[in-house]
Image: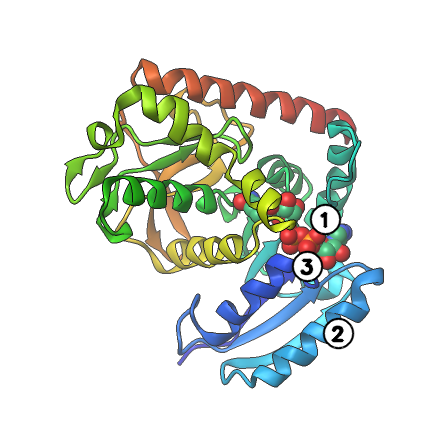
Amino acid sequence: PHGTLTVCITGGAGQISYSLLPLIASGEVFGHEQPIELRLLDIKPALEALNGVVMELHDCSFPLLRGIVATDDPMVAFRHADVAVLAGSFPRRPGMERRELLAKNVNIFKAHGHALDQVASKNVKIVVVGNPSNTNALVLSHFAPSIPKGNITALTRLDHNRTVSQVALRTGVSVNDVDGVAIWGNHSATQYPDMTRATAKGELAMPMLGGRKVVAEEIIPCIQKRGAAVLKARGFSSAMSAANAIGDHLRSWLMGDSKIVSMAVASDGSYHVKAGVYFSFPVRCVGGGEYEIVQGIELGEFSRKYVSATTEELFAEREEALSLL
Ligand code: NAX
């Protein structure tokens, strides 16, 4: 028999949460036997909207949903949390400087890190979604010293899924038949969607994709700028696909995955990325919240220049964030 899993979502009244909640509460993420208690955190001005979300959750009458707490107090929201999805963050306003945005988010992730450190389960599994997600994860871990760094991740599964999908569309196979893609580095425009070892139905995909020139000039920029393209088309940033990716990330991480996936995790010197940042790597998830960074991949010259650019950006973001603490 399963005990109840306490799942906390910050930015509970936001659009990603709205798409994620039915996946979690219906059993799609943690399995159809796993009872769930939800904790929804948002800020005071959003509490009325959050209450509407709670009403709708009740109206869904999900059999696995054993309780809902909606609050603006992180100490209440994170109490005994087993899983925390951190989507609550300060949005970029027109004309806002990057540093100003970073400063707002440093404060949020400082407060949330502190609260998680105090009241969450020591085994809590955390996925940071709010941007800049890798650096927010770093700030969080700094203020949550009692939570193992390996329990903190940032989301790059959306970028990974976008890459899988582009390879499938462009080689004419189904997404199930694509393997071997990876996202390296920051969840930003410097991310490196790596297709050099991708296979479509077991065959190397690069030639079918049109070779290095097409990959470099067309496909990589398409994935790097996909978020902006969705925002431009929809008038809102990606939410359905982001929620779907969060579900995939948590399912792979907690239940295991036969395929290699991408997650931003604490760097440990693998691939010359020194410890000190949250960096997306290809990882193998064996289940139960354990992962290992896949070792031994030969990064050719083509890949190395992308990996160094995104590494440099992450260490620069790290410096900037640390200067704001
Ligand atoms: P929304 O603006 O719809 O929702 C954000 C919610 O967070 C709002 O309800 C807001 O009131 C709340 N919030 C703000 N400060 C808070 C605080 N201190 N504590 C708790 N809640 C707080 O954004 P949404 O579209 O849901 O996106 C959420 C975040 O995900 C954004 O930062 C966005 O940039 C980021 N994304 C990250 C992605 C990734 O792959 N890592 C992809 C999707 C998305 O762009």
CB within 8 Å, label 2 to label 1: no
Quarter of the C terminus within the rendering: top right
Q: Which residue is mark 1?
A: 114
Q: Which residue is mark 2?
A: 51
Q: Nearer the viewer, mark 2 or mark 1?
A: 2
The CA distance from mark 3 to mark 1 is 22 Å
User: Relative to 62, does residue 165 appear above or below in the rendering?
Assistant: above
Q: In the image, residue 22 lies at what x, y percent?
A: 53, 71
Q: Which residue is mark 3?
A: 14
The CA distance from mark 2 to mark 1 is 26 Å
Q: Nearer the viewer, mark 3 or mark 1?
A: 3
Quarter of the N terminus within the rendering: bottom left
Q: Amino acid at mark 3?
A: Gly
Classify mark 3: helix, strand or loop: loop
Residue at left 27%, top 48%? 259
Report whether the residue tagged 3 is closer than 8 Å to ligand 1. yes
Q: In the image, residue 264 lies at what x, y percent?
A: 48, 39
Badge 3 density bin: few <14, some 14–19, many ≥20, Cα 10 Å? some
Q: How is the image coloured?
A: rainbow
Report whether the residue tagged 2 is closer than 8 Å to ligand 1. no
**Disc on the earlier residue, 2 or 1:** 2
Q: Is residue 146 visible?
A: no
**Disc on the earlier residue, 3 or 1:** 3
Residue at left 60%, top 51%? 234
CB within 8 Å, label 3 to label 1: no
Q: Nearer the viewer, residue 276 or 281?
A: 281
